Amino acid sequence: MSDRSRAFAEKFMVRPGKEFRLKDIDPRDGSAFEDEDATKAETDRLSRDIDALQDRLYAEGRRSLLVVLQGTDTAGKDGTIRGVFNATGPIGVSVTAFRRPTETELAHDFLWRAHLACPKRGMIGIFNRSHYEDVLVAKVRGLAPDKVIEQRYEQINAFEKMLTENGTVVLKFMLHISKDEQKERLQERLDNPRKHWKFNPGDLEDRKSWDDFQKAYEALLNACSTEWAPWYVVPADRKWVRNGIVARIVKATLEDMDPQYPKATWKPGEFKVE
Amino acid sequence: MSDRSRAFAEKFMVRPGKEFRLKDIDPRDGSAFEDEDATKAETDRLSRDIDALQDRLYAEGRRSLLVVLQGTDTAGKDGTIRGVFNATGPIGVSVTAFRRPTETELAHDFLWRAHLACPKRGMIGIFNRSHYEDVLVAKVRGLAPDKVIEQRYEQINAFEKMLTENGTVVLKFMLHISKDEQKERLQERLDNPRKHWKFNPGDLEDRKSWDDFQKAYEALLNACSTEWAPWYVVPADRKWVRNGIVARIVKATLEDMDPQYPKATWKPGEFKVE
């Protein structure tokens, strides 16, 4: 990663071992970018660069990239995927949405379904929500005792370490919106008939637990931002700022991986197409 | 489907119950479109229409579309996915490439891995190669006796009938290129170092069996083009013609499915976002 890219990424990184407070991050912070139109144009270019780098990753066929997207309801997880990864298209990108676990999933440990959905070599895998729900909802709703939640942090860290040691780079983004912004976005789902299907009355219940969710996020960000798989907290009230930040960090990460088209194990002159 | 769209699709459809000869289809046939630039622009528009229709399909959450792509090496399966489905992006489209079966896959019947990869409700699933390899390679290489191949045709028909009866519309495209065009495309992979990784010496072996593969295709097209899941044979020597044909038929099929944004089961006035 270039020094400039590294410095940019570090602005949003939760430093492993340092105490992190979610309150220090302003969801409306737009200081990373000056101009909306210029940022959108840059994000378009970045998304095409990501496509080109993914082509190399696929050709190389040895490593993969896992992008974890977390955020409260309406934080913009789908919008981020569209803004940053649509140019790459569906051949090289697999998206997994983690919903309420099925009976089969519940019959296994909480990391089982996450492991199953990890990207193959050569692919970019995107988790829309993830194994982190098991230290979020589970903590807020008291579905597991504190001791189990603490154990899960360590289990997640070990799991992600194993992934990175086996060729999967792990990037984790928390899309951070303000309570006011969520209000506007939920209201829009109620007001716009086209968006009715996106509204889930349960979202209002979660909203009542806003502070508890923020605390649960803060706890996992402190426990699970590691040297091998750091968390990035992305100011997400402005969609174009959010997409710009994610696109820059994804591109820099892929450049850092520097995937190479494999050299042929045969000599072109050996073959003749009849 | 409009009468015009239906008439267009039927030009490429293998009519169930009528004898079909692959030789009657010219891989260079460009009569469907007049102008390259206009066709590319139309395909771009169609791919955005497909994205909008997929959004409805996803919101509706009741049905799915399975697109099967078959064709000899270099026929352009990846290129078709990029040209027709990149605008839809990775959230609503899952692509499965069927390669040499794994030990686990071989330990099951031949339809097992295809079934596992079928799209969820709301999704478009694309098979890059498919269960049809088991009546293609298997037939040409004599991996299964004729009697088993004949049985498989019927098993495939029953499987696809079951899928359609349960809400998955099945569209099957054979990308039909000429032997000369394949020669050019294979040679390009040998000549262009950037494309070396795409070249597989085994492709030349398959090319030696060109006529046998064409016969195997003709047999499956006659046996497995059904009222519920017809085959379309797409002249594919020209990439823009190929993409234009596939995009038109996919769009018309989705329009025919006419997915609807679901009506809310609640009254917007019942809720207040605090």
Image (cartoon, coloured by chain):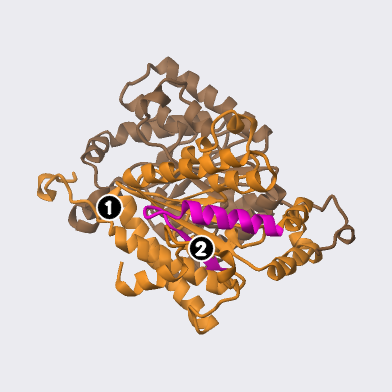
Chain colours: A brown, B orange
Give the image location of residue B264, x and y in percent.
17, 48
Of the residues tagged 1 and 2, which is closer to the observer?
2
At mark 1, the secondary structure is helix
**In percent of the image, x 30 and y 73: which residue is there?**
B3
Q: Residues within 10 Å of mark 1 (few under 14, many from 20)?
A: some
Report which quarter residue B146 is drawn in.
Answer: top right
Q: Nearer the viewer, residue B66 or B47?
A: B66
Q: Is residue A144 above or below residue A118?
A: above
**In percent of the image, x 57 and y 63: which residue is there?**
B175
The answer for which chain carries disc 2 is: B
Give the image location of residue A226, x and y in percent.
59, 33
Give the image location of residue A14, x and y in percent.
53, 39
At mark 2, the secondary structure is loop
- Segment colored magenta: B210-235
On residue B20, which mark appears? 2
Same chain for the residues at labels 1 and 2, yes or no? no
Give the residue type at disc 2: Phe
Q: Mark 1 sits on what residue?
A: A185
**In percent of the image, x 29 and y 37: which residue is there?**
A210
On residue B71, which mark appears? none
Q: Quadrant of the C terminus of chain B?
A: top left
Cα distance, mark 1 to mark 2? 55 Å
